Amino acid sequence: MTIPVLEIFGPTIQGEGMVIGQKTMFVRTAGCDYSCSWCDSKFTWDGSEKNNIQKMNAQEILDALIEEGGDHFGHVTISGGNPGLLPQLDSLVDLLHTHSVKIALETQGSRWQPWFTKIDELTVSPKPPSSGMQTDFAKLDQIIESLSLEQKGTFSLKVVIFNDEDLDYARSVHKRYPAVELFLQVGNDDLETADQAELLAYLIERYERLIDQVMTDKELNHVRILPQLHTYLWGNRRGV
């Protein structure tokens, strides 16, 4: 089966989650079962770029990665949308591993795929109230349990924080899965600003506020607090 691909780019750095700062290539797939209010990649699911979707098999994707990145990469991030919708990604995961390429992937934990257990660095990022989405915790429980038992690589949880209600949600997630490493990441709610310096100052202010909140919270003594690093460097630009 072919894989719906919207973007292949890099090498660049990973700006989010447990692999922040990692040199990586990106494969962005199309399609999502969510429609988060603040999504920074709505083009993957809102139909605006449906004519740009390429149906590619695993070998074609690998060839495109090599054409774009040459021999300057050993790590690939599979992004979306929600790549967790695609059972056929199993073929790409296996092919990349045969070429000694490590793989990172992020999904919201709404669907389970057996190939999740093969991912080297898997981020499960359930969406907080500000997204407008509802977490199916029964499904998320099943996914976390399966990963805890079967994951060959590493996995973690990440919650994006936009407001105090989101932080409350993150606390509840942390209490529910205390054995899983949790990353809190500041959300970017300004996706239109083209002035990079203005956006950077705004995002740093939000990051500092979240740090201050967590420092005085005894329930969050074992979390990591992250910026969205690529927005600090390139603002709201795509393909970087």
Image (cartoon, helix red, strand yellow):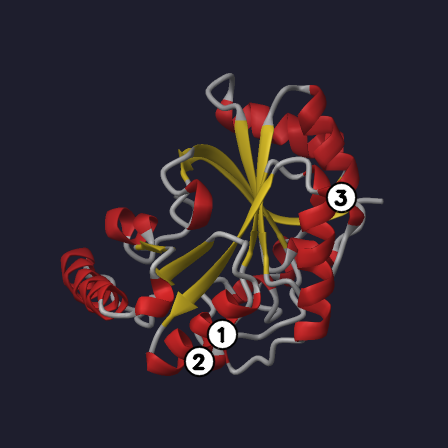
- Residue drawn at (73%, 27%), measured in percent from left and top? 95
- Residue drawn at (57%, 75%), measured in percent from left and top? 35
CA distance separating discs 2 and 1: 15 Å
Q: Position of residue 26 (x, y in %)?
A: 52, 40
Q: For this rendering, which residue is in front, 219 or 108? A: 219
At mark 2, the secondary structure is: helix
Q: Is residue 180 left or right of residue 240?
A: right
The mark found on residue 115 in the picture is 3
Which residue position holds label 1?
172
- Of the two numbered discs 2 and 1 on the same chain, state the one appearing first in sequence: 2
Amino acid at the residue labelled 2: Ser
At mark 3, the secondary structure is: helix
Q: Position of residue 51 (x, y in %)?
A: 65, 58
Which residue position holds label 2?
130
Q: For this rendering, which residue is in front, 193 or 34? A: 34
Q: Position of residue 30 (x, y in %)?
A: 64, 57
| Image vertical order of residue 144 relative to residue 150, above or below | below
Q: Quadrant of residue 109?
A: bottom right
Q: Quadrant of residue 107?
A: bottom right
